[in-house]
Amino acid sequence: MADALPTPFRLPGYRVLVAGGSKGIGRSIALAFAEAGAAVSVCARGQAALDEVAREISGLGAIAHVQRCDLADPNAIHAWVQAGAKALGGIDVLVNNASGYGFNDDDEGWNAGFQVDLMAAVRASREALPYLGQSANPSILHTSSIAAFHPRRNGAPYAAVKAALSQYTTSQALALAEQRIRVNAIAPGSISFPDGLWERRRVEEPALYAATLAKIPFGRFGTPEEIAHAALFLASPWAGWITGQTLCVDGGQQLNG
């Protein structure tokens, strides 16, 4: 595992909304922005995890707002974005991180991915747009996946909706460029954290875990903090000339297909 690093970025005054920010990558993104001095609003389905991340954000001296939200529900997204904008005094950065983890090739798997990975990002962006238009440093970040770039024998729904999200990133960036709203995505490789997908597979599917690890040139799984560092950069003024891009953060994993 990579050692935790203090953020090199300072983003005081930023107001950041993180969809799916109570665990794993989303939690690390929320905490990284809080450590950088931003006020943060997080939504997720579980209240206990939300309460814990609120305590962590507040412990970093940042303003915290959390709200339960089923990201497959357009009305819940509307309620969260409006409440988050009110609590923080506006929106500078929207992070669409949630996933429905639609791996099964059935209607339920496809619908979970379509509604949460793709349409939740579309709907949250739409809700946040009036606030982003008033920001001096507006940007939208989507969490895609390296699964978007290669065919998959298993998990076709997940790969397909992540590919759609990466494509949406480019079209959205072009559409919003006149308003100087930057739009980018991050494509993580295999990320491990307690009670996460890969930690469960380590126990339940050790052969798959070992085969995946063997494909990563760096010889280890990534950490949520490493994705958070990329998110901070892409949302910061240091990335002010970057839009419409999907940044792979994978330790070279996709180099091996």
Image (cartoon, helix red, strand yellow):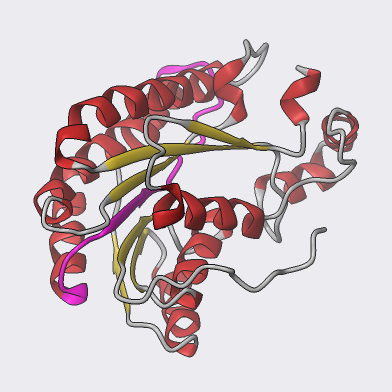
Task: Return the x and y of residue 221 as percentages of the image width and height.
Answer: 79, 45
Task: Return the x and y of residue 101 as percentages of the image width and height.
Answer: 51, 36
Q: Quadrant of residue 224?
A: bottom right
Question: Relative to the observer, which residue lies in front, 17 or 9?
Answer: 9
In the image, residue 110 above or below residue 126: above
Task: Return the x and y of residue 10 as percentages of the image width and height.
Answer: 46, 73
Q: Quadrant of residue 38?
A: bottom left
Q: Quadrant of residue 37?
A: bottom left
Q: Quadrant of the C terminus?
A: top right
Task: Return the x and y of residue 32 as percentages of the image width and height.
Answer: 52, 68
In the image, residue 182 above or below residue 257: below
Residue stretch rendered in magenta on the structure: 87-107
Q: Is residue 73 visible?
A: no
Left or right, 209 with reference to 98: right
In the image, residue 52 above or below residue 32: below
Left or right, 49 with reference to 47: right
Q: Residue at x 55, y 16 (%)?
A: 156
Q: Is residue 38 visible?
A: yes
Assess whether residue 247 is covered by the magenta stretch: no
Assess whether residue 104 is covered by the magenta stretch: yes
Q: Quadrant of the N terminus?
A: bottom right
Q: Residue at x 12, y 50 (%)?
A: 133
